[in-house]
Amino acid sequence: MLLLGAMASSCNLDYEPTTQYSASTFWFSSKNTEGGLVGCYTPLISGYLYGQSAIAFEECVTPNAYNYYNSNGWNDIAKGTHTKDSDIANGRWTQCYIGIGRCNNLLDNVDRSKDMTAAEIARTKGEAKFLRAWYYSILSTYYYSAPLITATPDIAQIDEPRADRAELVDFIVNELTEAATLLPKTVGGSELGRATKGAALALKARVLLFEASPLCNPSGAVEPYRKAAAAAKEVMDLGVYSLFPDYASLFKEANENSAECIFDLQCISNPVNCGHSLDMVHAKDDSAAPLQELADGMYMRDGKPRSASRYSNAAGFDKMDPRFAACVAYPGSTWMGREVKMESNACFTNIQTGYLFKKYTIYSEAAPTTAQLDMRSKAQCSPTNLMLIRYADVLLMYAEAMNEAGEMSLEVWNATVRAVRARAKLDDEALVYPSDKKAVREAIRYERRAEFLGEGTWYNDLRRNKLAETVCQGPVHRYDGVELNVRNFNAARDYWWPVPAKQVELAPNLEPNNPNW
């Protein structure tokens, strides 16, 4: 009995098997850690975040575009009929926490690596911190606040309440500040698409500008704008980025990874689920169809609305801001070897409004090849990289923040708004500094709509500037004036999405929900 007792007391119950990975031994290998890091990036390509056709569908809750079959519930949001069971709201929340959980797991375990250098571990932590901050920035942007969880996923976390918004935003900003110190200035070769110092600083500027804007800063205090400007200026001062010389060509596969790209999704056509679906959505389904309200809202080449422009009597589209024709195939234009017409034909089978987006597609005015036509039937296979942050955004964020802080100048205008407009080939009179703060504000707001047309950013610009309640109201139309539906934005409710009902059912501590939800 004594012998048996001795044997039992010396038995190691923490024995790690050598024929399979355990939770601790998985991280010993740099190859496994790299796989874990890839998993941290993967939610970004989800159709609930930026993959499939998400950036295009986000245009459809604004007067820019129309989604006729209510993909993921986007049309419900546009009409103001969405509920706490919204598919996009639940899917976006879920994907963010999938990403956060993976980042937390990696950060808790990467120091176990037995074959990574200290520098490699530090960089890996920087990427995970950047991505975790990105996912939390989505949650803070759409849902106001969410549970702040920084440890490896555990069932007990389901009881976590939503964090105070200020605490959550401070966490995001601090994470990005730290990530910027751990990440390289540039990447190349097989590392393209990985986070950089500039990406962390640019996202920091985006987060800070959102917080500085009227939705979150109703008093108009200037200090939040100064912080946003400082973050954007850090990106500019890196000396890494510049505007690509030709706007229309920037979004083609041949010009991926240009000096304008700060952070993107690296997409390929094969295998399946390694690209996006914009070739199918724009060139076949037209399920993110540009509206007449978009055409009416575009300025002319002189940088003025048609009614105030010297081109006010110009017929057609040729005197409009060139970015419209670069992004949109319009009635009478040629695209994919065919004249664009409202009625269906062999090339355009589902034209909804008379217009089609062409940004980020592989197509041009020329007739498509058989292989290119085949791409229209394939979801999640479009090969053109999607830029989630590009340098034009940083320049316009800097201009906006400086103007709202009362620090705009001719020098700042020329380095930012003028540079973006000059690249777009607007007339010289559109490049002149207005000097008046209100005029500069309106110029920047227009620039953000025109420059990022089809990229899914205008909805949040309208929200953060408290303009959605005015702009996202009323009927929207086809090119010929036919009404498609009526938009509604409830100012007392819709500036924040609801915490999804499915999440509250699982985790009651997420209550109370956002106002009027």
Image: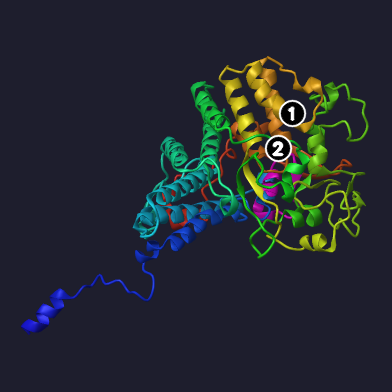
Question: Residue at coordinates 56% horizontally, 52% vertically from top-left?
Answer: 191
Packing grade of label 2 (10 A; few <14, some 14-19, many >=20) is some
Which of 73 and 340 lies nearest the eye of the viewer?
340
Let me know if residue 479 appears in the view.
Answer: yes
Looking at the image, tell me whether mark 2 or mark 1 is earlier in sequence order.
Answer: 2
Query: Which residue is situated farthest in the top direction here?
Result: 435
Question: Residue at coordinates 86% horizontally, 55% vertically from top-left?
Answer: 348
Whether residue 133 sits left or right of residue 451 in the image: it is left
Please tell me how many numbered marks the rendered image carries: 2
Whether residue 140 sits left or right of residue 18 in the image: it is right
Question: Residue at coordinates 58% horizontally, 17% vertically from top-left?
Answer: 407
Label 1: element kind: helix
Which of 258 and 397 lies nearest the eye of the viewer?
258
Q: Residue 412 in the image: state x and y as whole percent.
A: 63, 21
Label 2: element kind: loop
Locate the C terminus and report the quarter of the image it occupies.
Answer: top right
- Three-letter residue code for mark 2: Phe
Give the colour scheme of this rendering. Answer: rainbow
Residue that numbered label 1 is attached to: 421
Q: Which residues are magenta?
A: 55-73
Residue that numbered label 2 is attached to: 244
Q: Is residue 354 magenta?
A: no
Give the alpha-carbon distance from disc 2 to disc 1, as whole Å. 12 Å
Vertically, is 88 above or below 450? below
Which of 47 and 463 lies nearest the eye of the viewer?
47
